[in-house]
């Protein structure tokens, strides 16, 4: 199977459950997975890894990443179901999603709550919700909703929850790229309103400041542009725990 064909199949499998959650849930899932380059980028670059089975998704929304993990697992179990050029992902993912908005948690439960192993969705604030021991933490376009001190506090809690060899996948907007950052913030506010949520203030940092913060917390960090095909200034930070030995 070619990568393009595999991605089309993965897109269909991962978004189909959202029909149970209603038209909004289904259309949002299809648009998000189809247009946001981060999801295919995570798969093709092998950033999840088969040994990173315990996943915590902070700001999980309606649980799209849980559905993606389950769909990848199912495709890899089929003969010729996975492109040879794509690295493997966890065979039995254990997923915990944390989301502040009750409406999104309800859509997640209605759409993908039936998956096995069952994903766990927690309606709570990322600043205080308990983080289970994990191998991978995913935070996509979320930390800018809390102030700079709270951002650091969340990352410290993530650092504590990650087990040896753990990884953080953090997508941020680079505030040093003023035009792209401003566009992304405008789109973010618009989507927040469409989803029926109150628009809150946001706090950004330049890319260099994000990388310095993560290094100070004990991560080795590499950055990857992750806004291909969009006008945004999004960057994915791949932060691995440093070997303490």
Image (tube, helix red, strand yellow):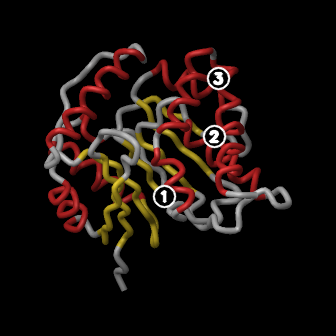
Measured Cα–Cα span from mark 1 to mark 3: 25 Å
Horizontal side, residue 195 vs residue 53: left or right: left
Give residue 212's quadrant in the image.
Answer: bottom left
**What residue would you read off at disc 1?**
136
Give the answer, above or below, for where 223 lies relative to 122: below
Q: Is residue 26 visible?
A: yes
Q: Quadrant of the C terminus?
A: bottom left
- What element does badge 3 sit on? helix
Q: For the residue carrying disc 2, how many other residues have a C-alpha within 10 Å: few (<14), some (14-19), or many (20+)?
A: many
**What percent of the width, then of the height, locates residue 47?**
50, 62
Q: Tell me which numbered mark, 2 or 1, is placed earlier along the sequence.
A: 2
How far separated are the C-alphas under marks 2 and 3?
12 Å
Write down the residue under mark 3: 110
Mark seen at residue 85: none
Identify the residue at horizontal 31%, vertical 71% (top origin).
220
Q: Residue at x 16, y 60 (%)?
A: 208
Residue 67 is marked as: 2
Q: Nearer the viewer, residue 212 or 39?
A: 39
Percent coordinates x, y for residue 109 in the rendering: 61, 27
Q: Earlier in the sequence, mark 1 or mark 3?
A: 3
Choose between 51 and 221: the one closer to the eye: 221
Left or right of residue 12: residue 208: left
Please say whether residue 127 is visible from this viewpoint.
Answer: no
Q: Earlier in the sequence, mark 2 or mark 3?
A: 2
């Amino acid at each position: 199977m070619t990568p393009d064909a595999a991605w089309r199949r993965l897109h269909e499998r991962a978004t189909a459950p959202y029909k149970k959650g209603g038209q909004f849930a289904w259309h949002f899932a299809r648009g998000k997975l189809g247009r946001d380059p981060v999801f295919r980028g995570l798969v093709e670059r092998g950033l999840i890894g088969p040994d990173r089975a315990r996943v915590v998704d902070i700001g999980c929304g309606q649980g799209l990443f849980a559905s993606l993990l389950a769909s990848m697992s199912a495709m890899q179990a089929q003969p010729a179901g996975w492109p040879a050029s794509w690295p493997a992902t966890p065979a039995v993912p254990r997923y915990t999603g944390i989301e502040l908005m009750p409406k999104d948690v309800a859509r997640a439960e209605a759409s993908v709550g039936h998956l096995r192993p069952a994903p766990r969705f927690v309606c709570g604030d990322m600043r205080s919700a308990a983080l289970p021991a994990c191998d991978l933490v995913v935070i996509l376009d979320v930390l800018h909703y809390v102030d700079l001190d709270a951002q650091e506090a969340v990352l410290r809690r993530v650092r504590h929850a990650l087990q040896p060899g753990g990884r953080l996948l953090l997508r941020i907007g680079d505030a040093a790229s003023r035009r792209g950052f401003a566009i992304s913030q405008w789109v973010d506010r618009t989507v927040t309103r469409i989803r029926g949520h109150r628009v809150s203030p946001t706090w950004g940092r330049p890319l260099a400041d994000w990388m310095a913060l993560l290094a100070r917390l004990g991560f080795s960090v590499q950055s990857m542009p992750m806004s291909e095909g969009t006008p945004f200034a999004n960057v994915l930070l791949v932060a691995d725990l440093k070997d303490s030995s």
